[in-house]
Amino acid sequence: MNSEKDYTDDFSLRSIISLLTLVVFIGILIWLSFNVHIPKPAVLKEIIQGYGWAGWLVFIGITALIAITPIPITIPALVAGSLYGVIAGSLFSFTGILLGSWIGYWLARLTGKNLTFKLLGRHGPTVEKYLNNAGFLAMCTARLIPGLPYWPVNYGAGALGISQYVFLSATLIASIPGQVSLVSLGAFAAHQSLFNGIILVTAWITTLAAIWISYRYWRNKRKDSK
C-alpha cells in the first residue's frame, strides 16, 4: 500500500511539472551559454541606441535576461551609466535586475528544492548556509557577500521558500550600492563632471561599507551559533 502511494507521489502532477521546468530551464541555460555572448560596452551601447526611443526597454530586457543566467551583470550597468546617466541608468538597471531576479526566484519555486540545488552545483551549500530560514536582514547581507553571484541567490531563495516580499525588498535595497557604483562608473567614464565624480566616490564608499557590514553580520552570527 505504501509503495503504491510512494509511486503515485513520484509521478504526481507537481513532480512532473517540476521536472519539465528544470529540463526547459537547463536547456535555456545551455543555449545561452553557447549562443549568447555579452558584447563589449561600446557594441552593446550601439545596439541599444539603434532602437531609438525604445532603447531603454531593450536595455531592461537584456539586463533581466542576463540576471537569470550565470553571466555577470557588470557590463549592462556600465552601459546604463554611459547612455542614461547616473539617475536614469540606475533606475533602468535596478528594474532589469529586479525583473530577472524575480523570474529566477519563481523558476526555482516551480522546480523545487532538490532539483534546483543540483543545478546550483558548488554554490548550493553556500546558498543554503546563508539563506536557510533567512529573513529580510539575512537576505540583504547574502546579496553583499563577495564571490557569491546574483543567480544562485535568486534560485536559492525561491527553492528554500523565502517570502516573495522579503526576497524582492531585500534584493532592491541590497542591490542599490553595487548597481549605483557600477552605473556611476560608466557615467563618469562618458562624462567627467563634478556631479558624476561625487556620486561615483560616494557609491563606492557605500558599497565597501555595506560589504563590511555584511561580513561583520555573518561573522557574529557564526560566533553566536557556536
Image (cartoon, grey):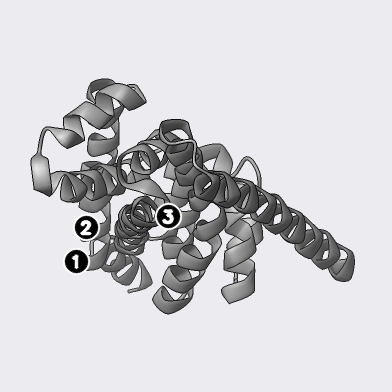
| Position above or below: 14 against 108 | below
Instruction: Check the picture and name the quadrant holding the C terminus.
Output: bottom right
Looking at marks 3 and 1 on the same chain, the residue that comes earlier in the sequence is marked by: 1
| Few, some or many residues within 10 Å of mark 3 (<14, 14–19, 20+) | many
Labels 2 & 1 near each other (Cβ < 8 A):
yes
Q: Residue at x 30, y 40 (%)?
A: 83
| Kind of residue sitting beneath label 2 | Ile
Task: Tell me residue 18's x, y (percent).
Answer: 27, 57
| Kind of residue sitting beneath label 1 | Leu
Give the number of the disc on residue 218.
none
| Position above or below: 12 against 188 | below
Number of labelled discs? 3
Residue under label 3: 155
Which quadrant of the figure has residue 7?
Answer: bottom left
| Position above or below: 5 against 120 | below
Q: CA distance from mark 2 to mark 1?
A: 5 Å
Q: Residue at x 47, y 63 (%)?
A: 171
Q: Nearer the viewer, residue 49 or 74?
A: 49
Left/right placement of residue 199 relative to residue 186 reads right
Looking at marks 2 and 3 on the same chain, the residue that comes earlier in the sequence is marked by: 2
Residue under label 1: 13
Q: Nearer the viewer, residue 112 or 222?
A: 222
Q: CA distance from mark 3 to mark 1?
A: 22 Å
Of tags 2 and 3, the one toward the viewer is 3
| Kind of residue sitting beneath label 3 | Tyr
Residue under label 2: 16
| Few, some or many residues within 10 Å of mark 2 (<14, 14–19, 20+) | few
Determine the secondary structure under disc 1: helix
Determine the secondary structure under disc 2: helix
Left/right placement of residue 116 relative to residue 180 reads left
